[in-house]
Amino acid sequence: MIEVEVDSIRISLVSQHRIVVLREVDSERQLPIWIGPYEADAITIELQDVEVARPVTHDLLKNIIEELGGKVSHVLIRALIDGVFYASLFIDVNGEMKEIDSRSSDAIALGVRVKVPIFVNEDVMDEVGVLPEPDILEEELPPAGEGETLDIFSDFLDTLDFDDFEE
């Protein structure tokens, strides 16, 4: 099992779906999972410490588990079958570990509420985990005079006399 944490929630520009991005704790490898807008909101509400007037569904589930004497141990994204992620909640009830089948988005939303580790089966991460693309702003440019010629903006900056900008 590989421990992950919620890296971000991203919005699709072409649909109402969201993507929760799980990032491997000891690596930059990520696991993107498509989720619905309500589940995305439920995760975001908890991660941003947003106060809600009444318990949302995942708060209710947390409260029920606790009232019945259970304690969520961890969340596991255990399989990917025909493009669908399958997850399990592991709940300790009076010393007996129960595995409860769950949608990944609901398991993650509950997991962040009760602050337990989230894991991904190694096979799943190996199959669909990705390394993030380098950010265009973080890419290193070659030193001046090497590689490509300077662009027009760089040429313009070279013509400026910054003493002219002093008061």
Image (cartoon, grey):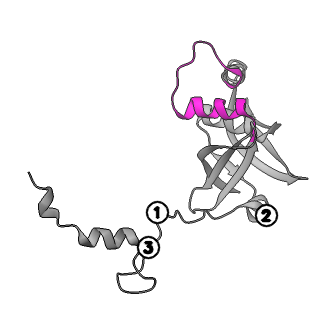
User: Tag 2: residue type?
Assistant: Glu
Q: Is residue 95 visible?
A: no
Q: Could you say which disc has been placed on residue 127 in the image? A: 2
From the viewer's perspective, is 149 left or right of 166?
right
**What residue did someone put label 3 on?**
140
Q: Is residue 140 visible?
A: yes
Residue extending farthest right: 82
The disc, 2 or 1, on the residue closer to the chain's N-terminal end is 2
Answer with the quarter of the image where residue 157 lies. Answer: bottom left
Q: Position of residue 105 (x, y in %)?
A: 74, 38
Front one among 91 and 156:
156
User: What is the quadrant of residue 154 in the picture?
Assistant: bottom left
Q: On screen, 130 above or below 145?
A: above
Q: Is residue 37 magenta?
A: yes
Question: Which quarter of the rendered picture does the N terminus lie within?
Answer: bottom right
Image mark count: 3
Query: Viewed as shown, does residue 136 lie left or right of 4?
Result: left
Give the SS element for disc 1.
Answer: loop
Q: Circle 2 — which element? A: helix
Q: Residue 128, percent across and down?
A: 76, 61
Nearer-the-camera pick, 90 or 22: 22
Residue at 76 percent across and 48 percent down: it is 77
Disc 2 + disc 3, Cβ < 8 Å:
no
Residue topped by disc 1 = 137
Closest to the observer, 75 or 67: 75
Position of residue 116 measured from the top left corner of the image (x, y, whole percent): 61, 40
